[in-house]
Image (cartoon, coloured by chain):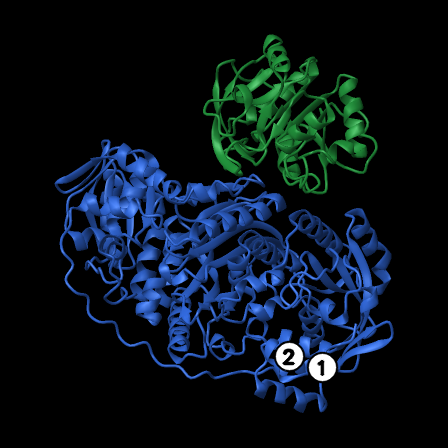
Chain colours: A blue, B green
Amino acid sequence: MQDPEITPELIASHGLKPDEYERILDIIGREPTFTELGIFSAMWNEHCSYKSSKKWLRTLPTTGPQVICGPGENAGVVDIGDNQAVVFKMESHNHPSYIEPYQGAATGVGGILRDVFTMGARPIAAMNSLSFGEVDHPKTKQLVHGVVEGVGGYGNSFGVPTVGGEVRFHPAYNGNCLVNAFAAGLADADKIFYSAASGVGMPVVYLGAKTGRDGVGGATMASAEFDDTIEEKRPTVQVGDPFTEKRLMEATLELMKTGAVISIQDMGAAGLTCSAVEMGDKGELGVRLDLEKVPCREEAMTAYEMMLSESQERMLMVLRPEKEAEARAVFDKWDLDFAIVGETIAEDRFLIMMNNETKADLPLSKLSSEAPEYDRPWVETPAAEPLADVPQIDPIDGLRALISSPNYAAKQWVYEQYDSTVMADSARGPGFGPGILRVHGTEKLLAFTSDVTPRYVKANPVEGGKQAVAEAYRNLTAVGATPLASTDNLNFGNPEKPEIMGQFVGAIQGIGAAVGALDMPIVSGNVSLYNETDGQGILPTPTIGAVGLIATGDDVIGSQVRDGHVALLVGETDGHLGQSALLAEVFNREDGDAPAVDLEAEKRNGDFIRNNRALITACTDLSDGGLALAAFELAEGSGVGVHLDDGNTPFLFGEDQARYLIACNFDQAEALMIAAGQAGVPITTVGRFTGDTVRFDGSEAPLEELSALYRGSFEATLG
Amino acid sequence: MKAAVVTFPGSNADRDLAVSFRDAGFDVTMVWHKDAALPEGVDIVGIPGGFSFGDYLRCGAIAAQSPITRAVKEHADRGGYVLGVCNGFQVLTETGLLPGALLRNSGLKFICRTVGLKVETSASVFTEGYNAGDVIDIPIAHHDGNYFADAETLEQLKAEDRIAFTYTDNPNGSLGDIAGILSANRRVLGMMPHPERAADTGHGGTDGAALFRALAGGLTLA
């Protein structure tokens, strides 16, 4: 097949701007071949190059004594003691999931799992954060069903427990859903594998599944806005095969034990191109590939297609040549392809040959080092208008409105489609607070949470960015965990619009301040921009995934309250209703400022919970829906009623930060009051867990009735 | 006591099953699906949960043709013990070691939750740690756990007291609420729920542990 001529249209269809093409001409001093153009487009799109976000990502705190490896590798690596490390990352698969929900979500899970085991870690936990359009939008139900089945279909077969996540609905996601997948794995701290190649003349080995035409140009698609030609983009979505991924994981971990691996990189976005360039670039080496040796599952694939294919379940490795036979035997055992497809070379070249014909010959290091980087113009998000009056409402009516909304109703329809118990280490599955997993064979446990409140970020990117981190911190704290580190999955609209870039910059500032103050450095992450359809951007959604450590099972703070328990509220309550769940769900309003986040108070109150965990029988943090929703959820989960003394709307539904609700007996409550006084932590008795009704001051309803509403609403609306 | 746990390439609960056998006192060997023989002196074979060969077609259909499955069949034919959990149960029906088939859940969705199981018979080495009529809490996690058999087979299972467990609240449409069945010689048990995910205090309850304890004690008497 003849390569097409390089025309301005072809260049534009590769997502390259005219000045970016000029830069290519400057670098190579000639017109690129078709394959070369494809390679540049793959390396320089937003998704792979972070060209709009890099400048700001550099400002994030990423280090700490607990951090073994921060951003820049496939996943972050954090020390959990005893020469063990937790390896984790969160990544978006938004665009593919909107185009083809099942496969888009499935391969999103596959991609993040691969990132984790590429580092030498066995995946032990998955979570996902999903944002969909409004519930009655004609596309929403189909997307929810497809995405949830895709997440489950991949993770369940692979065999990793899905222990947490979020699902939200908002009209801003009508044309652009978000699928953010998180995975964490365990590795020996001294046996982490990295991507930097070393040594000249070392074999470059292709591992895993065969290459097909699926996903060609996927990363470029993911870096563009959507319009009505979206159906034409379906072929750019990859197809997942969890069975192959499972074998690839087992084979890769087995291979790593043989000592054969010099460096390894999974083939994700822009497949063979990105992985080969990454390994060469980090190792300051060139790479030569002979494409006729690449295992293909389709006939007559061109160099261009092979270099840009995003076929799943593939890896690239630089091999210690003396270990070849041993390495090959491992892949034979698992019936996976193992093919030497090239070698490392001393010159700074990315040399792509096919049947002795040169298809591309580029200066390898320049593909990353000379990638465009933009300091996009941005404007600060204007301060929110003050909150208009909010009328008092009957508090039980308010609660009913929240728990019957798919945003706040129980999500078991979703999470029961995910295997949350495989590996037999799940100490707490999904449904209430973070997922908790035992570190297999040890006393330790890890807690996992994923959080963001997009409407806060829209109203006030800085405070909203802080709040996402603070909520993650509180969720981990509420189960007794010490937060270790975070991963950020930054989903925004078109960065070429200064107001969108302003949201991004503000959110990064807030996240940076919060992870610094709360000692939860960002160790990995992903940026997803251009989440717009027909010019309408999503709510800015910087999802924070966070991991906490608990020394032993005895240190876990439970979630079961007993009849007679005192309800204690930790933290200051001002009754902040701006941008609250109540405002949105009851009054259909999104006005006012986001709640301010006092990071000192967060730290102090969080430390208080951890330091006094022995006195706390059950605990939850306060977030969306304030005290009312927290008290209901805690009571409902234990089948015990709750009576709160104050029925004032801002008191019950305000979303002030740095707060926790505790359940404990009277003696424990007394001891906690004394401890709080000494620590300077605000604490008040707000009511009791008792009986079989939910009573907020004079308003009351049977727990059973509310529970049925809470448990049934999601399925009734979307099932 | 010697147990062997089979690993198909897509098994994902093989470790979990091995841990439960080990905790109950078994000496456990992992066996690979390409192995043609079981290790010498194996008393019981565990066929674990997972997606043996991806299970894109009929669950367990390809696994039923593996070299190791032939060895497991010979072991069972000699009167050896076999425990198949989840995908393992599907493999056992595919090999014919147990009657019936496991269809797609009636709700057409994967279901992961802890369910109530009624112990229908204590007359087997697998269930003698319980009393008939006990209700135990055990997690399920499957897409194809809807047990089906023809009327004659169902009658026979009932008449021969071979229904080991039934669901107290049928989650998947299984005929007769069946969650697990025994072979005619009562030495092969297939069940969709995962007792190995409820076998120690740190995780999902302990109601499954009695099954493994009973096995560890019971096989010596057999």
Q: Secondary structure at mark 1?
A: loop
Residue A482 at least partly seen: yes
For residue B76, the mark is none
- Quarter of the image that includes the N terminus of chain A: bottom right
Kindly identify the amino acid type of the residue bearing the numbered disc 1.
Glu
Pinpoint residue A575: horizontal percent, then vertical percent: 19, 58
Dot 2 or dot 1, earlier in sequence = 1
- Residue A8 is drawn in which quadrant? bottom right
- The vertical placement of A667 against A336, above or below, is above
Dividing the picture into quarters, in which one does residue A379 lie?
bottom left
Q: Are marks 2 and 1 in contact (CB under 8 Å)?
A: yes
Task: Name the residue: 31% across, 33% down.
Answer: A639
Q: Check disc 2 and give the amino acid type.
A: Leu
Which of the labelled discs sits on residue A10, or is there none?
2
The answer to whether residue A73 shows anywhere in this view is no
At 77% from the left and 62% from the top, the residue drawn is A206
Q: Which is nearer the eye, A249 or A701? A: A701
Query: What element does badge 2 sit on?
Result: helix
In this view of the protein, which residue sits in the foreground, A673 or B124?
A: B124
What percent of the width, then of the height, locates residue A706? 27, 37
| Left or right position of A620 against B94 | left
Q: How many other residues sit within 10 Å of disc 1, few (<14), some (14-19) or many (≥20)?
A: few
Q: CA distance from mark 2 to mark 1?
A: 8 Å
Residue at image location 14% in from the left, 42% down from the top:
A697
